[in-house]
């Protein structure tokens, strides 16, 4: 994967791609930085769904936690 961030000064933009992409099909996505940030957050949330634990009924017993005997 190859990623670059540009701040264009006009509506035309020329980009140079790495040599390893020449002759291959590439996908170009144009997003503003806020959209990209939201997409990264959504992907992270989706990847963590299986690791979420409901702790709403959890009660912490400090005496039991500090009982070393």
Image (cartoon, rainbow, N blue to C red):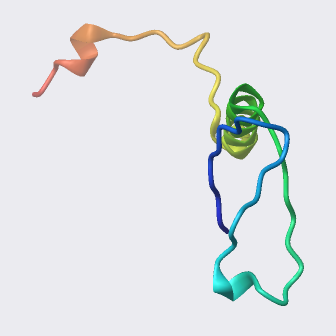
| Quadrant that contains the N terminus | bottom right
Q: Residue at x 77, y 30 (%)?
A: 35
Q: Is residue 62 left or right of residue 24?
A: left
> Where residue 27 sits in the image (x, y, percent)?
87, 65
Residue 66 appears left or right of 29: left
Q: Quadrant of residue 65?
A: top left
Q: Position of residue 41 (x, y in %)?
A: 68, 33
| Above/below status of 20 relative to 11 | below
Number of residue marks: 0
Specify the quadrant that holds the C terminus.
top left
Q: Is residue 33 above or below residue 18?
A: above
State left or right for residue 39 relative to residue 54. right
| Residue at the spot 61% in from the left edge and 11% down from the top edge | 56
Q: Nearer the viewer, residue 13 or 21?
A: 13
- Residue 12 to residue 56: above or below: below
Asked which quadrant contains residue 11, the reply is top right
Asked if 58 appears above or below 3 in the picture, the reply is above
**Residue 53 percent across, percent down from the top left:** 62, 29
Q: Nearer the viewer, residue 66 or 43?
A: 43
Instruction: In the displayed orientation, state which residue is furthest to the left.
Output: 69
Which residue is more in the foreground, 2 or 61?
2
In the figure, residue 6 lies in which quadrant? Answer: top right
Q: Where does the image place residue 66, in percent across and percent down from the top left?
A: 17, 18
């Amino acid at each position: 994967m190859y990623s670059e961030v540009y701040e264009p000064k006009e509506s035309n933009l020329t980009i140079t791609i790495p040599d390893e992409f020449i002759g291959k099909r590439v996908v170009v996505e144009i997003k503003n930085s806020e959209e990209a940030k939201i997409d990264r957050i959504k992907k992270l949330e989706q990847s963590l769904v299986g690791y979420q634990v409901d702790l709403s009924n959890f009660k912490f017993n400090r005496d039991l936690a500090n009982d070393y005997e």
